Image: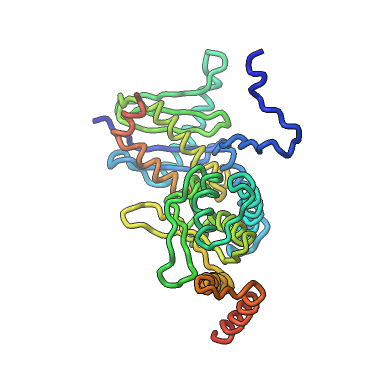
Amino acid sequence: MAAIYSLYIINKSGGLIFYKDCGTKGRMDTNDSLRVASLWHSMHAISQQLSPVNGCSGIELLQADTFDLHCFQSLPGTKFFVVCEPGTPHMESLLRYVYELYTDYVLKNPFYEIEMPIRCELFDINLTQAVQSDRVALLGR
Amino acid sequence: MIGVGKMKQYSNVLDKPLSKGKQEVSLSAFAFLFSELVQYNQTQVDNIAELERRLEDAGYAVGSRVLELLCNREKGNRRETRLLGILSFVHSTVWKVLFGKVADSLEKGTEHEDEYMISEKELLVNRFISIPKDMGTFNCGAFVAGIVKGVLDNAGFPAVVTAHFVPIEGQQRPRTTILIKFADEVSISTSLYMIYLYLEKLNLSPGLPTSIHAAQVLKREARLSQ
């Protein structure tokens, strides 16, 4: 069974605003997750500059021996990325769905300050449901 | 021409029935607008009780308007005069127009005679809202409580209305209960009405002036007994 390791959301300026561990593997402490987030933000920006193609929107998928990293960038510049076991399917649709949850339960919440770390109970509840593996397969259909 | 002649012509514009209008608005648009309302009011207050009061005031204005509109549109310019009538009007008619559905339940309070509760598993205004832990029991349903208060006050049933989170067993999210506590004169006028009906049955109708006098006497007695 392909597994999701963790999920990140980073704001326009590269700060980590949300991090979630989804399994026992690939757990990271706070410092490491912050480091991954800002590293990824810079790499994403560099890849846009270095790309031989015009109008490149940055890395969407990074494949390594032990993990896949799928990234989705929304139009305002917020990046969502998920680290998972190599070859896990339906990750693009999962990221789209996470973006949808973000717009619903974070942006419509009057107590959320934009660009700040996300602490919204409803977002957590719905996200936990979404990353359950059977739910991910359903999203892919 | 097709369709011509089917349109009924009204010589007087006042005879024309009021159109029902478009029944739905975008939930997202409402959610953003409501979110802004809460955020704006948050900048104007020092404490949570004040914020609750301001949301309630905003709802009160909606409630008084909704009462006028619905009495005209749905009830042929008639207004509910009975306590249970107005409560079920709020629970079904008002709720349906505002939130697209009838409220989940309407119950009588167990501890006090003059308390009623309207409960909703997920209140529409709270759909996207997570209350931060440091705000305690604050509930944005205060806005809806204000609407209910607006309807009841303007219909002649003054009440104190508050919104509360009530945890349900086996559920992650609490439900919202709108608690309605009627003012003393409401229960007095209700019991008076029962006396009036009873007297009428016995052909002893006291007539209006007497009943007003009786209301004053009863009110005074109620105050003395406290």
In the image, what residue occupies the spot 64% across and 75% down? B212
In the image, what residue occupies the spot 52% across and 67% down? B181
Determine the residue located farthest toward the right in the rendered image.
B12
Pick the front one: A133 or B189: B189
In the image, what residue occupies the spot 28% across and 33% down? A134
Indicate whether A112 appears above or below A92: below
In-image side of A50 versus A134 (left or right): right
Indicate whether B109 appears above or below B150: below
Q: Is residue B173 visible?
A: yes
Q: Position of residue B27 (x, y in %)?
A: 54, 39
Q: Position of residue B30 (x, y in %)?
A: 58, 41
Kindly indicate the quadrant of the structure image that contains residue A49.
Answer: top right
Indicate whether B21 appears above or below B178: above
Q: How is the image coloured?
A: rainbow
Kindly indicate the quadrant of the structure image that contains residue B175.
Answer: bottom left
Kindly indicate the quadrant of the structure image that contains residue B165.
Answer: bottom left
Determine the residue located farthest toward the bottom in the rendered image.
B224
In-image side of A7 versus A25 (left or right): right
Q: Is residue A13 visible?
A: no
Classify the position of the N terminus of chain B by image quarter.
top right
In-image side of B111 versus B138 (left or right): left
In the image, what residue occupies the spot 36% across and 29% down? A139
Q: Position of residue B222 (x, y in %)?
A: 56, 82
Classify the position of the C terminus of chain B by image quarter.
bottom right
Q: Position of residue A65 (x, y in %)?
A: 30, 25
Pick the front one: B130 or A58: B130
